[in-house]
Image: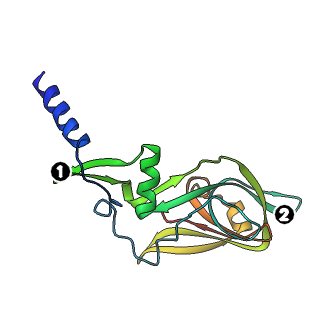
């Protein structure tokens, strides 16, 4: 019974802290070189031309053309990630020196408020870019749509991608680095 009372007291004190601050959880994140970390999404607005994050739900060829079914997302990091996680009740909560500190694991948070899947055609010259571990650490490697279709990597439907479009046609799909 005493451990229960102690835990209740600690939770009550944490909830009553008058000083709240947001933290991006940088202490928990692994070190990522600046050129590897990509930009974050700030909106799910999808236009005819642009760069948006999304999950590739399906990649296929039909009538000699390649297509992807994309579910657009917001890929957030830093304070924007913490704020979004707090709004959704997903932020980690710690008490440090009497202050409530909020964070997200590995300094990123994905929001998918609209699960609408869009079918987009790939440009004939569209390239995929993936991450792999090489002799010198993480490295990017390109692939054509034909090469991807011949040997579809698991990461294609598991990782978020940055999808670049021009006039509604996909020109580039780059795997988003996720720690």
- Tell me the tag on residue 65: 2
Mark 2 vs mark 1, CA separation in Å: 59 Å
Residue 20, position as x, y percentages in the image: 29, 53
Q: Is residue 148 above or below residue 158?
A: below
Quadrant position of the C terminus in the picture: bottom left
| Mark 1 nearby-residue class (10 Å; few <14, some 14–19, many ≥20) | some
Find out whether the residues at labels 2 and 1 contact each other: C-beta distance under 8 Å: no
Q: Residue at x 17, y 37 (%)?
A: 10
Residue identifier under label 1: 98
Q: Nearer the viewer, residue 125 or 39?
A: 39
Q: Is residue 179 at least partly visible in the picture? A: no
The secondary element bearing badge 1 is classed as loop
Quadrant position of the N terminus in the picture: top left
Question: Across the whole image, how many numbered discs are drawn on residues?
Answer: 2
Q: Nearer the viewer, mark 2 or mark 1?
A: 1
Residue 28, position as x, y percentages in the image: 30, 59
Q: Is residue 63 above or below residue 126?
A: above
Q: Nearer the viewer, residue 51 or 129?
A: 51
Side of 25 where 54 appears, left or right? right
Q: Is residue 170 above or below residue 114?
A: below
- Tell me the tag on residue 82: none
Q: Nearer the viewer, residue 20 or 151?
A: 20
Q: Residue at x 74, y 71 (%)?
A: 49
């Amino acid at each position: 019974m005493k451990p229960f009372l102690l835990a209740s007291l600690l939770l009550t004190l944490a909830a009553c802290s008058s000083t709240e601050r947001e933290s991006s959880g940088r202490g928990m994140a692994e070190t990522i070189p600046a050129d590897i970390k990509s930009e974050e999404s700030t909106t799910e607005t999808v236009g005819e031309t642009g760069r948006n994050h999304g999950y590739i739900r399906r990649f296929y060829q039909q009538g000699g053309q390649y297509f992807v079914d994309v579910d657009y997302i917001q890929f957030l990091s830093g304070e924007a990630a913490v704020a979004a996680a707090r709004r959704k009740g997903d932020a980690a909560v710690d008490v440090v020196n009497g202050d409530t500190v909020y964070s997200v694991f590995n300094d990123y948070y994905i929001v998918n408020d609209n699960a609408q899947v869009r079918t987009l055609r790939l440009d004939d010259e569209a390239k995929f870019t993936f991450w792999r571990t090489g002799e010198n650490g993480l490295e990017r490697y390109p692939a054509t749509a034909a090469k991807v279709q011949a040997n579809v990597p698991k990461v294609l439907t598991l990782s978020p991608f940055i999808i670049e479009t021009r006039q509604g046609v996909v020109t580039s799909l780059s795997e988003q680095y996720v720690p």
